Image (cartoon, rainbow, N blue to C red):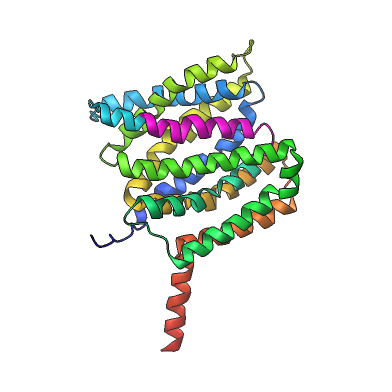
């Protein structure tokens, strides 16, 4: 049996990319909320991935990035697009028709809870530890506070939206582990472009089956939000995403969920006049504690301080 490999670390380059990713994804919830004022959910997802793919292809071709020619790589890109775009984008966009944008961002913070469990069984270098297990259990408590089991049992629209966002988090977690296992050999720009291209293809039958169409005349604030969502929070964001994933691993990548809810909440309050519920504060704090345990940095700092004080 081979020895466990050392866990990936978050260096300066990966850290800067992580911060940029948090900003672009944090504002995505605001862009979605505005876009939904004039565009149906599945059409919004279709436009998001299509525009993002079209924006990245000229960059790929201009930089001479190698385009995969083997069916196995394209099959992996289809799989990644399904796990990371088609299903979660649809759930996220649909879910935001029921809940506020900052609530959606906080619920997505549950993604690392799923990542830890999946990475333990599917990778060799991101194994479960006692601290990570504690983080998973605490994260479950935080999610329970956010979702509110009473509202969930009542079948309210807000609870339906919460369930959709938890589904989004689960699929994002699956995608993060999946791409580490199948796509690390693909250059970052091509991985993002291929994933968005395959997602665009897969979304066509979904959009047609849903009966979603563009409403005329176009609602220009909504269209502007779609452009920002596609170009900033999708095309550009996935370059940051792959840079962090390849250098720092799936668990370090999910640290973005610590920063993303803060950015999304600030944007929602500032631009959409959203009201923050006490439940959101409490749930977010519990999830943040869970993520701190999963990441382990805080515990290591305390351990070093304790050793220093003891000498």
Magenta stretch contains residue 96: yes
Is any atom of residue 235 visible in this view? yes
Is residue 286 shown above or below 38?
below
Magenta highlight: main SS:
helix
Percent across and percent down for residue 305 are 46, 79
Identify which residue is drawn at 26% across, 26% down. 71
Q: Quadrant of residue 9?
A: bottom left
Q: Quadrant of residue 33?
A: top right
Front residue of 242/221: it is: 242
Front residue of 169/225: it is: 169
Identify which residue is drawn at 32% across, 47% down. 246
Identify which residue is drawn at 52% across, 29% down. 228
Is residue 42 shown above or below 108?
above
Percent across and percent down for residue 55 are 40, 24
Front residue of 199/236: it is: 199
Percent across and percent down for residue 224 are 57, 24
Magenta stretch contains residue 178: no
Is residue 81 shown above or below 143?
above
Is any atom of residue 15 visible in this view? no
Please identify the residue farthest to the top as the structure is shown.
216
Identify which residue is drawn at 45% across, 54% down. 116
For this view, does 258 lie left or right of residue 4? right
Quarter holding the C terminus is bottom left
Is residue 43 shown above or below 282?
above
So how many labels did they put on this image? 0
Please identify the residue farthest to the bottom as the structure is shown.
311
Quarter holding the N terminus is bottom left
Q: Which range is magenta? A: 78-102
């Amino acid at each position: 049996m081979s020895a466990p490999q050392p866990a990936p670390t978050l260096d300066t380059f990966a850290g800067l990319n992580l911060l940029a990713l948090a900003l672009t994804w944090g504002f995505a919830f605001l862009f979605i909320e505005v876009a939904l004022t004039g565009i149906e959910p599945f059409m919004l997802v279709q436009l998001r991935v299509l525009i993002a793919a079209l924006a990245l292809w000229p960059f790929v071709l201009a930089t001479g990035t190698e385009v995969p020619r083997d069916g196995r790589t394209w099959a992996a890109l289809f799989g990644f697009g399904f796990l990371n775009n088609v299903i979660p984008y649809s759930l996220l966009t649909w879910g935001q028709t029921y809940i506020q944008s900052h609530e959606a961002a906080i619920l997505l913070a549950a993604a690392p809870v799923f990542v830890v469990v999946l990475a333990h069984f599917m990778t060799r270098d991101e194994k479960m530890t006692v601290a990570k297990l504690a983080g998973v259990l605490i994260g479950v408590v935080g999610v329970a506070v956010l979702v509110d089991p009473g509202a969930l049992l009542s079948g309210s629209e807000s609870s339906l939206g919460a369930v959709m966002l938890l589904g989004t988090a689960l699929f994002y977690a699956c995608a993060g582990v999946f791409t580490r296992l199948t796509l690390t050999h693909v250059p970052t720009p091509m991985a993002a472009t291929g994933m968005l291209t395959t997602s665009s293809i897969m979304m066509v039958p979904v959009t047609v089956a849903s009966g979603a169409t563009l409403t005329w005349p176009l609602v220009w604030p909504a269209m502007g939000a779609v452009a920002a969502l596609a170009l900033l929070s999708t095309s550009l964001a996935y370059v940051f995403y792959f840079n962090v994933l390849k250098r720092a691993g799936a668990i370090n990548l999910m640290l973005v969920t610590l920063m993303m809810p803060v950015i999304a909440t600030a944007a929602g309050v500032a631009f959409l006049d959203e009201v923050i519920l006490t439940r959101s504060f409490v749930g977010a704090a519990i999830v943040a504690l869970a993520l701190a345990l999963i990441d382990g940095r805080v515990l290591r700092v305390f351990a070093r301080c304790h050793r220093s004080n003891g000498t």
